[in-house]
Amino acid sequence: MVAISKDYVTSNVLVDDDYDRVTLLVDQNKTQLNSILSISHQEELLTQHMKLDNLYLLIKLDRNIRCQIKPQFIAFVSRVLTEIKLYETLEINNVITNVKYFELLNKGIMISDSLGLVYTNLQFDLTYRFFLEMLENYDYMIPPDGNYATLIIEILKYFMFIKDQNNGEFLPIPLIQSMIKIIRRLSYKLNCTINYKYVTVSNISSHEHKDTKTEISYNISDNNMKDVITVPTPCIIENVYEIDAIQYSLAIISSKKKISDILNSLLEDTDIKIFIQSLLKHSNINLKCAALKFFLYPYFNSTTSWRDTKTLRQILPFLLSTFDFKSIPWWFDPFNNLIKLIEVYNKKMPGGNPVVTFLRKSNLVHGFMELFFIELGEPPSSNGHQRRMTQYIRFFAYCSAFDENYRLELLKNNILIKQLKHDIKEHVTLLQDFLNNIDMLASMTHKFPALYNSAKVVAWLDLLKSFSRSAAALRTTLKKNNLTKDIMTLLDLTYQISKTCYFAGAIFLQSEIKVMGLSLGILCNFIVEFSNIQYFLKDEGIVDICGEILTDPLFNPKENWVNLTRKMSFEKISVEEVKTNTLWVIRHLMYNSQNREKLALLDKISIDTILDFVNDPYWPVQQQCFQVIKNLTCNSRKVINCLLERFKNVRYMVDPVDGSRVAIGSTYLFEFLARKLTLLDAHDLAQRKTLEAILYIIVNIAAVNENKKELVLEQTDILRVMHRILSENHENSEKYGNNSELKLACLWILHNILWDSNRSDDTSNSNLSSSQDDIDSTPESMHTSGHVIRDGFVGLGTEEGRNVAPTHPSVKAVARCKRLQELGFCELVKIAATDSNINVRQKATNLDDNMFKLLDGVIYLD
């Protein structure tokens, strides 16, 4: 091998031979390597270029050889990324020097990522400013000079790596703006090459006459339309540098987690949208993927873009077509994007996911299922196999989330459940080993990555949660395989990890908190179906662990922290799913339970602890909190009195007669509930379910006795909300969406207000709390249908088909009915009797009949 002398003899270069390169890297005498790494702009250009070329040859060493000298190679890559300071002199460097430097830097960052090195962005600020100045000089167009064009592309590639390592949040707004300007300039240049012959225009603007003939518009920027139905033919791009500039710019601007105004302006620009749409049909796979990334971006980062199902239908075929390509850009994963898209619509449109519908119609789900079963039968051979398996499991977890047919088809494969149990038990063993070696691990200074099978186990738990929504699966496959104990063990271990292993770092802890939340969700679903599983879980201490979780300051912000180090370790870790599903477990345990069971639970988990979550900032947590209270107050006067007591505003006075201390005051529970009712947005699923739960809490209170009925009737604000809900119809549904479940709850409140609690007949036969809780563990559950009444409230009164005998109603019941009549509820009940929903219609008809009889002076009893 020819050495490089200390005099920087520029005529000598390293030969392109792996043996020579390995020798240089492992040589303990680092003189030659040091001389190559010390590059300065003050050296001759030939010397700079020779050193950069040699470093590039060294860093692109064959993968197998790199593994054999891994410690030396990692040290070399680290030195390349930190010791070469050419980024400090970018403005005065030769353009070819800068090109070679960024080629080397990009290669080093790519390899460092594969080696697990943490790359620090030493060069970013200076590179970012240099790049903006260069773009301004060329008016954000790609320069004609090949060297400068190559430099721009290499710097864009560098930003891509930075984006990928920092989830896009590291990139400043001016840089995003510069990318947008590049897209705009290229759009103006290339739009003329798009063939608009077959583009169909829709939604002519309102200022034009309705009879105006619709014509094809070739001038897209004249704002005479809102949208384009079809995807135009691709634009013609002859400059290869422009192809790279477009793909990297689109990929970079589609990386921010929060859509800014400048990005909205681009998304709403019709010219830009059509230009990018044309790239979907381009033969270059990089451009196709860049366009897909741009159009998918709003669906993953906006709360409203999911409503745009027309664009979704346009891009889905192109997304699926990318599966046919062998070479896909490293920054685009078709399968992962498809999975994320399904997940978005599972949250927003449960039971009617348009992505799953499209896949079902095209029979692609069964195609993926065949590939999945093949992978299941093969022994794990590499990290790539584990990654593919994880993606398949996630895919079917989301596809089967609200589809019973897919669940049953998957469960026909015997290997699936065996592999699921094996991976869960393996994760349990790893966690036990981690806890057993906690003293040794705590002494280590570095943070831990997630366990190697954490992502796969999370995917399995997601799929198991989907299976547990199926009553058929719970009665057969899942019961036979006895998964309950494994999941309970997993829950216990992950909670122990959260309490004692906070030194492990955010990545490790976040993955185990996710496992913990899913475990609770699965147990929640198991509890619903079988009473014997409830007893088993109670014996295993499910109530105790739920009580611990709800009083842990990690999950309950009302509790005081003792261990501040633990608090800091969890500052950026999401625990909302754990809180939600813990409350959901309690909700299902208390469904249709006896009063003694409720009081026994409140001995372990106080009502004050449950009330700590009534104002939680995460809506699903509030939803489950109020659902728990709804089930607790069902047919339990003691719990209702306890609840009223907790909201009692008491002041003490001295009795002037005997000098004793007297408590004076009243409850503000109804003011609190009324405030909640007015603030909740019924168009959001979790908030609507919270609103429904609050109404049923009022139903339960009104069922207790005459005093409680009078108390409810005095709540003007609550009655006003009920009036508004019952007043809505298809034409007037802005506030509450004309929701039948909310209407039914309001009718039950009216029913219980009118019921005479002093009647001597046995009202226990009238308790209609017989519906089943929804089998689910997420706020977006697929609801059971066909039940007249929701769970966890007391419904009292006469129903059709009973033997009745006339009697006179009480004076108070008649007075309450007249009061409701004055407030306009009688008319609303008559209108509700014609509602399209059968449950609302039936309940309103019976209530209307009872109101008529009360006002007529006679009522029929059992």
Image (cartoon, helix red, strand yellow):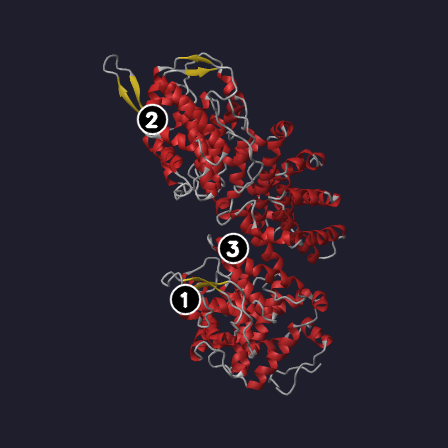
Question: What residue is rendered at 37% in x and 40% in y?
Answer: 679
Q: Tell me the amino acid under the disc marked 1.
A: Asn
Residue 349 percent across, percent down from the top left: 53, 47
Cβ–Cβ under 8 Å for marks 2 and 3: no
Image quarter of residue 463: top right
The quadrant of the rendering that contains the N terminus is: bottom right
Query: Can residue 271 be seen at all in this image of the molecule?
Result: yes
Q: Badge 2 is on which residue? A: 821
Q: Badge 1 is on which residue? A: 224
As helix, strand or loop, the secondary structure at mark 1 comes to loop
Q: Badge 3 is on which residue? A: 309
Q: Residues within 10 Å of mark 3 (few under 14, many from 20)?
A: few
Horizontal side of 710 relative to 543 (left or right) equals left
Give the answer, above or below, for where 475 lies relative to 39: above
Of circles 3 and 1, the one toward us is: 1
Of residues 498 and 427, the one drawn nearer to the viewer in this rendering: 427
Q: Tell me the amino acid under the disc marked 3.
A: Thr
Give the answer, above or below, for where 784 lies relative to 66: above
Horizontal side of 461 relative to 628 (left or right) equals right
Residue 828 percent across, percent down from the top left: 38, 32
| Label whose residue precedes the other's in the sequence (3 or 1) | 1
Of residues 75 and 154, the one drawn nearer to the viewer in this rendering: 154
As helix, strand or loop, the secondary structure at mark 2 comes to helix
Cβ–Cβ under 8 Å for marks 3 and 1: no
As helix, strand or loop, the secondary structure at mark 3 comes to helix
Q: Residues within 10 Å of mark 1 (few under 14, many from 20)?
A: some
| Label whose residue precedes the other's in the sequence (1 or 2) | 1
Residue 100 percent across, percent down from the top left: 57, 78
Q: Residues within 10 Å of mark 2 (few under 14, many from 20)?
A: some
Give the answer, above or below, for where 372 lies relative to 543: below
